[in-house]
Amino acid sequence: MLTSGEIETFAGTDLRTLIGAEPKAVPGTVPVPFPFEHRWLAILITDIAGYSRLIEIDKMATAIRIRHLRQHVILPTVRAYHGWIVNHAGDGTLMAFGRCEDALHCAIALHRGLALAEQEVPADRRIHLHMGVSVGDVLIADGELYGNAPNIAARLQSLAKAGEVCVSDDVLHRIVTMPDAEVKPMGDLKLKNIARMVKGHRVLVTNVRPTASPVGMENRVRRLSLSLKRRDACRPAPP
């Protein structure tokens, strides 16, 4: 129990000072109030091609498929190539890897994994990704990534067509074992909000035809979608 004097002392003292959380400013510097680290990382950013159109066709079925693909295709593939998922933002995913080779091989594997998972889905409703890969020094703070590498990867991803991976020249020069893909130079690119010119390359995935039977995800998605719609229809109206 605190004495009345201790209570008065605490009441008149800033709690951050008591626990030592308030950073001490050094003359001429800006205090950093959170832990951070610098790491050299390869950044892979993916986005779903035609996402708005798929949502308009059937938002529930699309949401179920995206959730399934994230859990059963994207996450295990990223882990298999020693990477991690930093975050999802809408239909986009940001991933980080310690090596450029792992990032590019993961991107190729994702294209092939999606082709396998989606082969029973009608062609106009299949989920395809377009991706961008960059590399550089990244500041990690509170689980977020800051630096040019994520920004450049996002700009390259926006230039990629469905089934393509756009990579910076810095990434391509660090690839020792090239995956089964065709590389086409894009030349020097002026990317939005990036001061320097970035030389880019299109990596076109080859041999994406599925070689095994999928798990019939489209049928499961359709059944689950109908089940959820029936459940919602049976719910009593709110008062």
Image: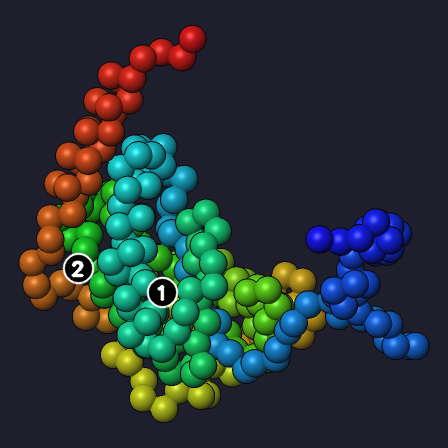
Image height check: is 54 above or below 75? above
| Horizontal side, residue 170 vs residue 4: left or right | left
Q: Name the residue beneath numbered marker 1.
A: 164
Q: Position of residue 130 (x, y in %)?
A: 39, 59
Image height check: is 24 above or below 66? below
Q: Position of residue 50 (x, y in %)?
A: 37, 45
Q: Distance between the residues labelled 2 and 1?
A: 16 Å
Q: In which quarter of the image is residue 52?
A: top left
| Horizontal side, residue 19 vs residue 130: left or right | right
Q: Nearer the viewer, residue 209 or 39?
A: 39
Q: Where is residue 51 in the image (x, y as percent from the top left)?
A: 38, 44
Q: Which of 224 and 169 is in front in this view?
A: 224
Q: Name the residue beneath numbered marker 2.
A: 116
Quarter in which the C terminus is drawn: top left
Q: In which quarter of the image is residue 64?
A: top left
> Which of the two discs, 2 and 1, labels the residue nearer the N terminus?
2
Residue 184 in sight: no
Q: Where is residue 95 in the image (x, y as percent from the top left)?
A: 44, 67
| Horizontal side, residue 138 vs residue 65: left or right | right
Residue at horizontal 36%, vertical 77%? Answer: 82
**Mark closer to the observer (2, 1):** 2
Kind of residue at disc 1: Glu
Q: Of helix, strand and loop, which one carries label 1?
A: strand
| Horizontal side, residue 22 vs residue 78: left or right | right
Residue at horizontal 28%, vertical 22%? Answer: 232
Q: Which residue lies furthest to the top in this view?
A: 239
Q: How many labels does the image show?
A: 2
Residue at horizontal 47%, vertical 63%? Answer: 86
